[in-house]
Amino acid sequence: MNTTGIKGNWDEQKGKLKQKFATLTDNDLMFAEGKKEEMYGKLQIKLGKTKEELHKIISAL
């Protein structure tokens, strides 16, 4: 998959996550190439979820 497809898909998922978890900001959900793990770490701390729980939440969007 090309990065344009990932970026477009992530923008949609990001909007859904912000609806579900009102405390999330654009900064929390900033997707940078090669920094996915860092983003997941920030989300884990902010939401109090495990990595597996985050994967399930994002997959279900």
Image (cartoon, helix red, strand yellow):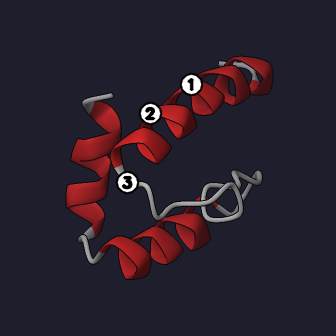
In the picture shown, does residue 20 fall above or below 28? Answer: above
Query: Which residue is identified by label 1?
Result: 12
Coordinates of residue 20 in the picture (x, y in percent): 34, 44
Kind of residue at disc 1: Glu
Residue 12 place in picture, x, y as percent: 56, 25
Quadrant of the image containing the C terminus: top left
> SS class of the residue under badge 3?
loop
Image quarter hosting the N terminus: top right
Residue type at numbered disc 3: Phe
Are the residues flagged by discs 1 and 2 in contact, CB closer than 8 Å?
yes
**In the displayed structure image, the side of residue 54 where residue 46 appears, left or right:** right
Label 3, label 2: how far apart the Cα atoms are: 9 Å
Q: Mark 3 points at which residue?
A: 21
Q: Mark 2 points at which residue?
A: 16
Residue at the spot x=69%, y=21% of the render? 8
The span from disc 1 to disc 2 (Cα, nearest Å) is: 7 Å
Q: Dot 2: few (<14), some (14–19), or many (≥20) neighbours within 10 Å?
A: few
